[in-house]
Image (tube, grey):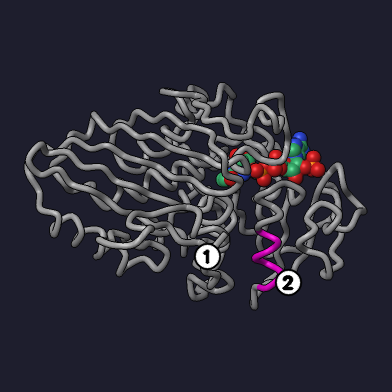
Amino acid sequence: MKVSVIGASGYTGGELLRLLVNHPEVTLDRITSESNAGSFVHMIHPNLRGFNIKFSSIKESFDSDLVFFCLPHGVSMDYLREFYDTGVKIIDLGADLRLKDKDVYKSWYGLDHKCPELLEEAVYGIPEIHREEIKKTRLVANPGCIATSMIMALYPLRHLNIDKDRIVIDSKIGSSASGDSFSASSHHPERSRAIRCYSPIYHRHIAEVEQETGFKVTMAPHAIEMVRGIFSTTYLFLNQPYDEKEIRGIYREFSEQNKFFRVVKQKKGIYRHPDPKILTGSNFCEVGFELDRENRRMVVFSAIDNLMKGAAGAAVQNMNIMYGLEEDTGLKYIGYHPI
Ligand SMILES: NC(=O)c1ccc[n+]([C@@H]2O[C@H](COP(=O)([O-])OP(=O)(O)OC[C@H]3O[C@@H](n4cnc5c(N)ncnc54)[C@H](OP(=O)(O)O)[C@@H]3O)[C@@H](O)[C@H]2O)c1
């Protein structure tokens, strides 16, 4: 299939190209960047040296079966309708198609939606929840990276008797999650070794988590000293006591149905709980937990690589499903150790 990447000079675009150049079913069509049109891709993504691909402009003609959008939210929706009307399949890695309700979108993003008619058709791209719908659609809203880490921890527990209005999450986030543009706060002397809370209470990814799980969530994200990786700690209050075996069984069943989901709960060793460090470059989400049965509390840990399961890896997983391929085609990378 012929595939294009729009906004390919950014971090998610670069990661998508890393996956697509070795995908057995993919031929690259347009790889766009407005500020780098005409230049070799490896001038921006040096890990792609040897592939001799060039950036073009979004204004040039496309001959693709599927187009990935890797643009900032608010920008994707300038182009989505036009591309959709040509009949191509679309996977949008930005936020413009993720929320089902245009008023909810406006309340979190402060923008009027420019193509609200597409929101109903767009399928929220977590295959672990919406696999069957993804098979049939030609419009996928790839989830947010922090949202993915939270949803993967919570969704399997949706049938438990827990306090669904009182879920507290603390997320730690690597610097690549905010893209390749820089600001005073991302300047190295300011960012390095900082543990900085930003958008506490009202982070936009909360809207996706509430939409997909039905839970009410309080979440505070923290920028930490990592380039890739998200680690979310979720605190749950249980309305009845549960056994560890029961919870483990729920997560294990979910992992049996989903190739990229793993439960991690080792009694020995250094990595007893999930750790995003060792998932770097892989599409896995790892989830672990500890249960305080007596006090009816549970803490869940979830880890991903934000550019893989949190963005490009999930996008390729969705593409595979849309084309009836094995879900892990071109995604069989495991993480690094040591790193
Ligand atoms: N980084 C992550 O971990 C992550 C994870 C999940 C989802 N996302 C989402 O994925 C999208 C892309 O993220 P990213 O991290 O790759 O961002 P990024 O590194 O900032 O890249 C953004 C891309 O969009 C292009 N662009 C920006 N403004 C444009 C405009 N007005 N018209 C056309 N092209 C424009 C940029 O390059 P040119 O100006 O050269 O064209 C660049 O290629 C965002 O919506 C982000 O929220 C990111």
In the rendered image, which residue does mark 2 sit on? 27
Majority secondary structure of magenta residues? helix
Rendering quarter of residue 89:
bottom right
Q: Secondary structure at mark 1?
A: loop
The amino acid type found where label 1 is placed reads: His
Q: Residue at x 72, y 32 (%)?
A: 182
Residue 21: say if magenta: yes
Query: Where are the magenta residues, as a range?
Result: 16-22
**Residues at discs 2 and 1 in contact (Cβ within 8 Å):** no
Q: What amino acid does circle 2 point to?
A: Thr
Give the class, few, some or many, for how many residues have Cα within 10 Å of label 2's Cα (few <14, many ≥20): some
- Indicate the quadrant of ligand 1 in the picture: top right
Q: Above or below — where is 179 with respect to 108?
A: below
Q: Is mark 2 within 8 Å of ligand 1?
A: no
Q: Residue at x 44, y 45 (%)?
A: 231
From where the camera sits, is residue 71 visible?
A: no
Residue 230 at what x, y percent from top left?
Answer: 48, 45
Q: Quadrant of residue 126?
A: bottom left
Q: Is residue 314 magenta?
A: no
| Along the line of sight, the residue nearer the viewer: 29 or 181 | 181
Q: Residue furthest front?
A: 269
Q: Nearer the viewer, residue 202 or 197?
A: 197
Instruction: Name the image quarter holding residue 193.
Output: top right
Of label 2 and label 1, which has the lower sequence position? 2
